[in-house]
Image: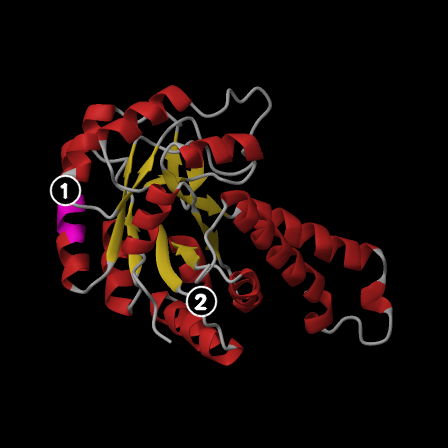
Amino acid sequence: MSFIHGTEMFQAARKGGYAVGAFNTNNLEWTRAILAAGQNTNTPILIQTSMGAAKYMGGYKLVRNLVADTIDSMGITVPVVMHLDHGNYEAAKEAIAAGYSSVMFDGHDLPFEENLEKTKEIVALAHEHGISVEAEVGSIGGEEDGIIGAGELADVEEVKTLNAAGPDFLAVGIGNIHGVYPEGWKGLNFERLGEIAAAVDTPLVLHGGSGIPKEQIQKAISMGIAKVNVNTEQQIAWAKAVRAYVEAGKDLEGKGFDPRKMLAGGTQAIQDTVEERIDWFGTKKING
C-alpha cells in the first residue's frame, strides 16, 4: 500500500465540517498504535514526525520505510498520509527526497518575504513529485524542535499572500500553543479564525491540539479547521500507563521486565487516545 498526499482528503474535510487527525510517532510502538487506531475506526490517518523524532529514529528514509512496512505487516487498508511536521527548508527537501507524501515547511520564524519565497520553492518541488505541502502563518506558541513561537495571531493579509504561493493546507496562529497549556490561557481566538476562514478556502490546520478543550476544537473545526495535530496527549498517556506498570511492581513479576510487556500498556494508551480524538474530530469513516 502506498501513501496518499492527502490534499483532496483535507479539502473534503473542510467542506464537510470535520477534521482529520495528525498524530506524531516516535518509534515502532507509537507507529503501530496510531495505525491501529485508524484501522479500528475505519478512518483515514495522518502519521507524522518532527525533525527531532526523525533524527532519533534514524532519519527520514528509515522512518518512511518503517511506517510503510508496518502498514503492510498490519494489513492496514485505510488511507495513510506520511507527513513531516514543522520542517525547516532543508528538512522539507530531505523528506521529499525520502518519499514522504506530505511535508510542512515552517518558515514562520523567517522574515515574511523569505518565508514566502521558500514556501514557493518547496511547493514547486513537492508538487513536481505529487507531494502536498503545509505552510505556516503566525507562530504557534511554545517550542517544537527548537522552533519557538510566542503564539501571535496570524495576519490575515499575510495569510492571503502566503496562500497564493500554492500550499495545500495552512497552519495558522490563533492563540494555540505546543505542549501543555498553562493556567490562564485565554483560549482560541475565534474572531481571527473567522477572518482567516473567510479570506481563504484552503484547509486550515490547528497545531497544539493537545490540551485544547473539546468544545473549542469542535468549534474551530466547524469554522474551517480540517487538520488537528496531536502529540503531547499521546506522550502523557504513554508515560502514565508505563509509570503505572512499574509502580505496581509488574516489571518484577516473572518476566515482567520484557520490554514487550512493559510497553504494551503505553502502546494501548496511545491507541485509545488517538481513537478518542478521531471521535472528537468527527473524522468521516471510509465508505460511510
- The location of residue 50, given as percent across then percent down, is 41, 53
Mark 2 residue crowding within 10 angstroms, few (<14) / some (14–19) / many (20+): some
The secondary structure type at the circle numbered 2 is loop
Whether residue 140 is situated above or below residue 119 in the rendered picture: above
Q: Residue at x 43, y 32 (%)?
A: 220
Please state if 63 lies on the left or on the right of 262 as rendered. Answer: left
- The location of residue 63, given as percent across then percent down, is 41, 68
Residue where numbered disc 1 is placed: 165
Q: Earlier in the sequence, mark 2 or mark 1?
A: 2
Nearest to the eye among marks 2 and 1: give it.
2
Quarter assignment of residue 184 = top right
- The location of residue 159, given as percent across then percent down, is 23, 31
Q: Nearer the viewer, residue 16 or 177?
A: 16
- The location of residue 65, given as percent across then percent down, is 39, 74
Please state if 273 lies on the left or on the right of 101 as rendered. Answer: right
Q: What's the coloring here?
A: secondary structure
Q: Residue at x 46, y 25 (%)?
A: 188
Quarter assignment of residue 229 = top left
Q: Residue at x 51, y 61 (%)?
A: 38
Tell me where the magenta segment starts and ends, as one range. Answer: 118-123
| Quadrant containing the N terminus in the rendered view | bottom left
Amino acid on which disc 1 is placed: Ala
Amino acid on which disc 2 is placed: Val
The secondary structure type at the circle numbered 1 is loop
Q: Nearer the viewer, residue 16 or 239?
A: 16
Can residue 87 be seen here? no
Quarter assignment of residue 81 = bottom left
Residue where numbered disc 2 is placed: 78
Whether residue 11 is situated above or below residue 264 in the rendered picture: above
Which is the main secondary structure of the residues drawn in magenta? helix
